[in-house]
Amino acid sequence: MSSLTCLVISPVGDPGTDARKRADQVFKHIIEPVVSALGYAAKRADEMGLPGIITGKLLAAVADSDLLVADLTDHDANVFYELAIRHASQRPVVQLIDSAQRPPFDLADMRTIHVDIHDLDSAEDARRQLEDQIERANTSSPVDTPIASAKAMKTLWESQEPAAPVLAEA
């Protein structure tokens, strides 16, 4: 059994809904095969089944898992909240979204894999991109996230060095 963990956060929906069907398909056919081949044990947040208060345990898994894959499809508020926590931890994260949608403005600069679950070529391309991004994410530490960038900008703005504000503005 793998010691590396991959938490997947996505809109899940109730059993029988289109959202659940999509979440299951993306997990089963795109995410799980790639992360397993790279040595991770993949788990979707709704499958954690931990006793006690789920929120604290889920948020700890969001911050502490070796890898997090976030599906931004349908702009789910829970996914964005959990993704923000992951960004604060500056640990490896990969974003994906339905090919007919776009990430919101604040996440548009982050690399995001676009997936059309109705197109087998798109699914294959998504698997290749996912593998590439996971391999690259594990080579940089800490991970560059919007929160990390904001902290760096704040440091520049508050610096006593005369050139720092100019660098921050650039």
Image: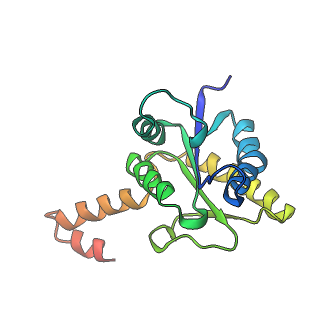
Quadrant in which the N terminus appears: top right
Q: Nearer the viewer, residue 139 or 134?
A: 134
- Estimate the x, y position of residue 169 in percent, counting from the top left: 29, 77
Could you tell me which residue is drawn at 59 percent across and 66 percent down? 74
- Estimate the x, y position of residue 82 in percent, counting from the top left: 45, 51
Which image quarter: residue 57? top left
Q: Quick one: which residue is furthest to the right in this view?
A: 120
Which image quarter: residue 19? bottom right
Q: Quick one: which residue is furthest to the left in this view?
A: 160
Could you tell me which residue is drawn at 74 percent across and 58 percent down? 126
Q: How many marks?
A: 0
Which image quarter: residue 4? top right
- Estimate the x, y position of residue 58 in percent, counting from the top left: 47, 39
Q: Tell me if residue 58 comes above or below residue 2 in the rendering.
A: below
**Which colour style is shown?**
rainbow
Quadrant in which the C terminus appears: bottom left
Q: Nearer the viewer, residue 127 or 13?
A: 13
Q: Tell me if residue 52 comes above or below residue 79 in the rendering.
A: above
Q: Is residue 126 left or right of residue 44?
A: right
Q: Quick one: which residue is furthest to the top in this view?
A: 1
- Estimate the x, y position of residue 168 in percent, counting from the top left: 29, 71
Q: Is residue 147 left or right of residue 115?
A: left
